[in-house]
Image: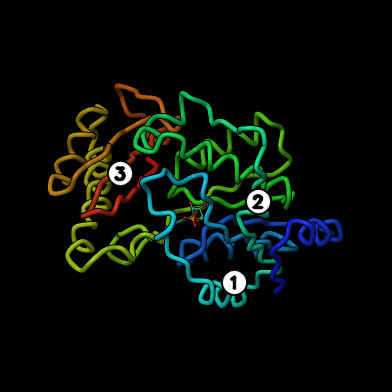
């Protein structure tokens, strides 16, 4: 595995690559969710490129940028064992100039749900993903459904800016008890860890109600809220897969989305119905 920290070196290596390139963008502190993306990339491509970069522009001033878990040594081991060919670990100075064009996520999509609590977050996400896609020029780029709104915005950016990369959505990896894996789960204390299960339980209860025939979005949202009553809920929504509110749920066209605080930790989860 080649470890690369400069744009210059990555560009030179990319020039020489033949065949398909699979790319996984991460902020490190890797878990089996990241690993599942890397594995899929490994199976489907000649070369696998992974980036680790805790991107400052996607954190709001009051968020956990400084505190965000950094696990360089463990991440290196995971990437080596997973057969990653090129690991790109740039500094902020390498990725950002003092003056550069602004990238703004579409207002209607970027300021609802995650974007409503985290205004500007998706501007930062699209800015770094665009830079990384321009550098790596991957054939296929792998993103988790765990960050469903992020995935949708990236798909929209790639399509509308005519970027020549296939965006491959990857299933959410969960603990055996249902908790969706997240680098932020390490913030959870013992009691929080139990409470955090409410998110996946809420999604399961809602999906069971849908399977039994309930189609009213508002009722499904109430079912989720009931399961989340011990948590501070940010949102619990049943939306179309293009993130529009609909009165009636249509199976195979719906996504259930939750964000809630467990203690001070904000967790998200979703289920594609
Ligand atoms: P992050 O390091 O949090 O920026 O995540 C890097 C990539 O891993 C993103 O595409 C995430 O959606 C994806 N990811 C994070 N958690 C999971 C999970 N539990 N299952 C699948 N993919 C995930």
> Which picture quadrant has residue 80?
bottom right
**Residue that appears at 20% across and 61% down:** 192
Q: Residues within 10 Å of mark 2 (few under 14, many from 20)?
A: some
**Residue that appears at 39% across and 60% down:** 67
Foreground of the two, 208 or 2: 2
Foreground of the two, 40 or 209: 40
Location of residue 225 in the rendering, given as x and y in whole percent from the top left corner: 18, 39
User: Residues under labels 1 and 2: Cα distance?
Assistant: 21 Å
Location of residue 162 in the rendering, given as x and y in whole percent from the top left corner: 71, 32
Q: Residues within 10 Å of mark 1 (few under 14, many from 20)?
A: many
Of tags 2 and 3, the one toward the viewer is 2
Kindly state the secondary structure of the residue where label 2 is placed: helix
Location of residue 75 in the rendering, given as x and y in whole percent from the top left corner: 53, 71
**Residue that appears at 73% across and 63% down:** 47
Q: Is residue 176 above or below residue 131?
A: below
User: Residues under labels 2 and 3: Cα distance?
Assistant: 30 Å
Give the residue at the far front of this rendering.
98
Kindly state the secondary structure of the residue where label 3 is placed: strand
**Mark 3 vs ligand 1: CB under 8 Å?**
no
**Residue underneath mark 3:** 259
Of tags 1 and 2, the one toward the viewer is 2
Foreground of the two, 92 or 184: 92
Give the residue at the far right of this rendering.
16
Q: Earlier in the sequence, mark 1 or mark 2?
A: 1
Q: Earlier in the sequence, mark 1 or mark 3?
A: 1
Q: Earlier in the sequence, mark 2 or mark 3?
A: 2
Location of residue 84 in the rendering, given as x and y in whole percent from the top left corner: 66, 69
Label of residue 95 in the image:
2
Label of residue 79 in the image:
1
């Amino acid at each position: 595995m080649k470890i690369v920290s400069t744009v210059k070196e990555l560009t030179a290596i990319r020039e020489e690559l033949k065949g398909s390139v699979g790319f996984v963008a991460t902020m490190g502190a890797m878990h089996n969710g990241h690993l599942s993306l890397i594995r899929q990339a490994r199976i489907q491509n000649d070369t696998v490129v992974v980036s680790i970069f805790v991107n400052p522009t996607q954190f709001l001033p009051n968020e956990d940028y400084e505190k965000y878990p950094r696990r360089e040594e463990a991440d290196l081991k995971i990437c080596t064992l997973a057969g990653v060919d090129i690991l790109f670990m740039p500094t902020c100075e390498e990725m950002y100039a003092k003056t550069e064009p602004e990238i703004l996520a579409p207002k209607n999509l970027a300021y609802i749900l995650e974007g409503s609590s985290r205004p500007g977050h998706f501007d930062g996400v699209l800015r770094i993903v665009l830079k990384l896609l321009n550098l790596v020029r991957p054939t296929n780029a792998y993103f988790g459904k765990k960050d469903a709104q992020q995935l949708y915005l990236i798909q929209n950016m790639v399509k509308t800016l005519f970027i020549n990369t296939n965006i491959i959505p990857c299933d959410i990896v969960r603990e055996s008890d249902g908790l969706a894996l997240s680098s932020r789960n390490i913030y959870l204390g013992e009691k929080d860890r139990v409470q955090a299960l409410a998110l996946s339980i809420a999604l399961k209860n809602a999906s069971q109600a849908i399977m039994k025939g309930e189609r009213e979005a508002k009722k499904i949202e109430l079912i989720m809220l009931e399961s989340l009553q011990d948590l501070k809920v940010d949102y619990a929504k049943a939306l179309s897969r293009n993130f529009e509110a609909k009165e009636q749920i249509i199976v195979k066209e719906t996504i259930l989305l939750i964000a809630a605080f467990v203690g001070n930790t904000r967790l998200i989860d979703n289920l594609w119905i």
